[in-house]
Image (cartoon, grey):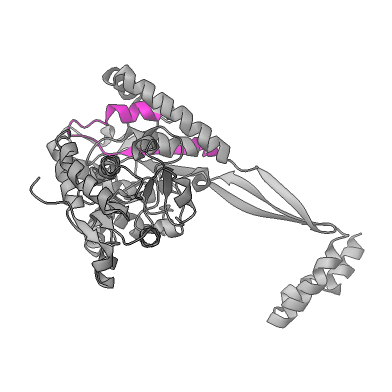
Amino acid sequence: MSRPIALHELSRLTPAERSALLVRAEEDLSVYLERVKPILDAVRQEGDAALVRFAQQFDKAPASFSAASLKVSTADIDAAYQAVSPEVIKALEFAADNIQRYHQAQMPEDMWMKEIQPGVLTGERWNAIDSCACYVPRGKGSFPSMVTMSLIPALVAGVPHLVMLTPPGPDGKADAATLVAARISGVEEVYLVGGAQAIAAVAYGTATVPKMHKIVGPSNSYGVAAKRLLSDLIDPGFVAGPSESIVLADETADGRVAALDLLIEAEHGPDSSAFLVTNSRAVAEAALTAIPQFFAEMSATRVAYCTEVLSGKRGGIVLTGDLQAAYDFVNDYAPEHMLIHAEEPFEHLGKIRNAGEILLGAHTPNTLGNYVLGPNAILPTSGAARTASPLSVFDYLKRTSLAYVTPKGYPIMAKPAKALADYEGFDAHANAVSDIRERLMRKNG
C-alpha cells in the first residue's frame, strides 16, 4: 500500500476542511455536462446509429455490433442461463424472493376516501406509471443485484411497460448474470446501451429503443449529468451516483470488523466515498492496523480503488471528540449507506436523521443489504438522503386526489370557498359556488 489511509481528526479541522469532507465526486458536474451534450444531441439526431457508434467507442463493442444487436433476444437470455453457475442462479432467486416480499409489504391501499365534513368525502387513488426504464451499470463490474432491486418493485407496483438498459461488453453481449436476473425478476425486454446515451435513448426514443416516462437506477457522473440535462423529457428519479457509505463505530465496536465493512463501498471505484466515523481512538487505530491485512485478501484492482478513496478527502477515518460530533457529521453528510457498529446499535439509531439506509449491528454488513436482505439498495447519494428516500414501489406509483361532495355537503363547503374566491378576485371561481349554481341546479332538478 503506497498511500496511507487518511485519519481526519475532526476537532483539529477548520470549518472549510470539515466541509471539504462532505463533497462527493458528482457534485461539480460542469465538466460532465459539457461532455455529454454532444452525446445527447447525437442520439436525438441519429438514433440507433449513434447508439451503435457509442457502444463501440465507449463500451468497446466489436465492429459487428449493429442496430440489430441493441435488443437482447430470448435466445440470448436462454444462453445466459448456461453461462451462470447454479449457485449464482439460486442466490439471485433467494434475493428476488426477499426483495418481492419487502416491496409487496410497501404497497399502499389502492384507494381510500374519508368523510371530512358531513357529506364531503376526500381521498386518494394510486396508479402505476405507464412506463419505466431501469438502468443497470457495468463499467467497473457487473451488477445483477441492481436488476432485482430496480425491476421487482416496478413489477410489484404494476408498471405495464418495463424495460432494462445495460451496456454491452467487448463481446457485444450483456453480462450473463444480469440477463438471468432480469428473467427471474420478470422482465425480458432488454436493450444493450449504456452511459449517457442510454438515458438519451429512452428520453427521445429511437427506432429500436422505446421512449419511456421515467428512468431509475444508479449512474456515474456522466449519467447524472445526462439525467439533469434531459429532466424536461424524462423523469430521472432521485440522484443515485457513485457509491458512498459511513460506518459509525462507538467505543464498544471492534475496529477490525468496522474496517472490514469500511471497504465494502470503497471498492466500487475511485469516485466512491467511504468513512469510518468513531469517537474512539482505539477503534480508529485498530481499523488502521487491520486494513492492510484485508488488502492482502483482495485483488489489485479493488485495492487500488480502496486506496484512492480512503487516502484522500472522500474517505478514511474520522475521529471525533465525542458521539454528538459523530452524529452531527453523519447527519451533515447524509450518506447513501449507513452501518452502526456498537454493542447496542439501537441506542444510536434515534440520533441519525439523514441516511439512505441504516444497517444495525456487526452482523448486518452492507453486503447483505446490497444483495439479499430485501430493502432496496438503490439509494439517494450526494446528500440527497436529506430529503429523498430509497427506491421503492412509490417511485413507480403516482397519487391522484379524489373528492366527492353530496347535496348535503355542498352548502358547508360553498360559503367559505366563495369568500376566498371573492378575496382573491377570481369572479368565475366565486360564481361557480354562488346562487347562480343553485338556480341552475334547481332548474335541472
Q: Is 442 located above or below residue 180 in the figure? A: below
How many discs appear?
0
Residue 178 counted in the magenta span: yes
- Identify the residue at horizontal 91%, vertical 64% (top origin): 443
Which quadrant of the view contains residue 27? Answer: bottom left
Which residues, given as a range, are shown in magenta?
A: 155-182
Residue 312 counted in the magenta span: no
Q: Nearer the viewer, residue 421 or 296?
A: 296
Residue 369 left/right relative to 271: right
- In the picture, the quarter occupied by the C terminus is bottom right
- Identify the residue at horizontal 45%, vertical 48% (top origin): 390
The picture places residue 174, in percent across and down from the top left corner, at 27, 31
Residue 253 left/right relative to 169: right
The picture places residue 372, in percent across and down from the top left corner, at 40, 32
Is residue 51 something that shows in the picture?
A: yes
Q: Nearer the viewer, residue 395 or 302?
A: 302
Is residue 431 something that shows in the picture?
A: no
Which quadrant of the view contains residue 312? Answer: bottom left
The picture places residue 435, in percent across and down from the top left corner, at 86, 73
The picture places residue 150, in percent across and down from the top left corner, at 42, 39
Question: Which residue of the protein is positioned furthest toward the left in this rendering?
Answer: 2
